[in-house]
Image: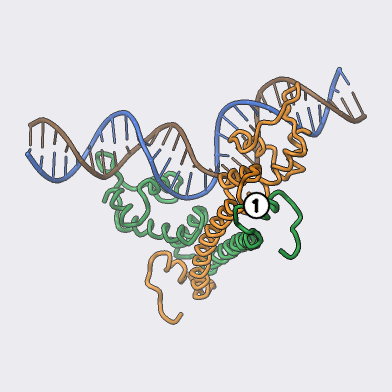
Chain colours: A green, B orange, C blue, D brown
Amino acid sequence: MNIGQAAERSGVSAKMIRYYEEIGLIEPPGRTESNYRVYGEDEVHILRFIKRARTLGFSIEETTLLLGLWQDKSRTSSEVRDIASDHIAALETKIGELQGMVKTLRHLVHCCHGDDRPDCPILDDLAGAPAKKGH
Amino acid sequence: MNIGQAAERSGVSAKMIRYYEEIGLIEPPGRTESNYRVYGEDEVHILRFIKRARTLGFSIEETTLLLGLWQDKSRTSSEVRDIASDHIAALETKIGELQGMVKTLRHLVHCCHGDDRPDCPILDDLAGAPAKKGH
DNA sequence: CTTGACCTTCCCATGATGGGAAGCCTTACA
DNA sequence: TGTAAGGCTTCCCATCATGGGAAGGTCAAG
């Protein structure tokens, strides 16, 4: 099948398939006489694997690792689990950061009367003013 | 003061200060005879404002808006609050997505025995295998 | 006067993706 | 058989915010 169909069947855009090939994440496929890329079921399967990993937030680099482990019969499941565990830890760090931002913003919004007056605790905070007590 | 000191005092790198100037987020400062940028307390204050907004996860675009509102005496606090509220909503969407990833990964890691055997539910899932019941 | 630390501009890289142009190929239809 | 539409190819550019580094000018301390 051509790249368009492989894209549709895997959920990875044609642009991205070519990019993955370029960076060596996937092997260059065969070509027709007229230089069209030709894919089979196996390639679609690999692309779906990649798609799923990306959806779970793994970076291309981590995905490369996982893909290697997937295709390596002698891998140990603990290798994969370590990658996944590390990734969970990274995601949780990120979540914590975002939650910190939300908490601060929520407090500021709560303190902001939000009417036609220009007085605004949010801007005061951004500008580095000391927080007023007792809102 | 020179750019290096402004950077140190504001927490914004010299590279970024020049970039912010280039994209019009901040005004071009005065120059010495030898073409060095010259900053004063006001500029450091603005840079700190920007730094804080960025730390809270506002994009450059949102920061531009907030900066404009900060310097606009006729602004209404509701304008600022709307920006902040929108930003909170965006952050929470992002947090939800990350939490979804963590939940899935956690389940997979829980199901993975993580030893020397190659059998690995995480890879099975990435490869699109139907989940086994009961783990 | 030298040396080292600072400043200037300019270009390039990141990570993952999309947009689009120019040109070739295939398929379907009149 | 001719043509038009749409798919494919490569190549370049843009994003967003940031950092790295080179080449060259400037300043301050010794």
Which of the chains bears the disc numbered 1?
A: B
Q: Position of residue A48 (x, y in %)?
A: 38, 59
- Residue B96 visible in rendering: yes
Q: Position of residue A66 (x, y in %)?
A: 48, 60
What number of labels is visible?
1
Residue C24 is drawn in which quadrant? top left
Q: Is residue A37 left or right of residue A127?
A: left
Q: Amino acid at mark 1?
A: Thr
Q: Residue at x 50, y 59 (%)?
A: A57
* Identity of the residue furthest to the bottom in this view: B134
Residue that badge 1 annotates: B55
Crowd around label 1: few <14 · some 14–19 · many ≥20 (10 Å)? few
Q: Residue at x 72, y 45 (%)?
A: B11
Residue B101 vertical placement versus B2 (above, below): below
Question: Element at badge 1?
Answer: helix
Q: Position of residue B13 (x, y in %)?
A: 69, 41
Q: Is residue D23 left or right of residue B100?
A: right
Q: Is residue B10 left or right of residue A97?
A: right
- Residue A93 visible in rendering: no
**Front-most of B39 and A35?**
B39
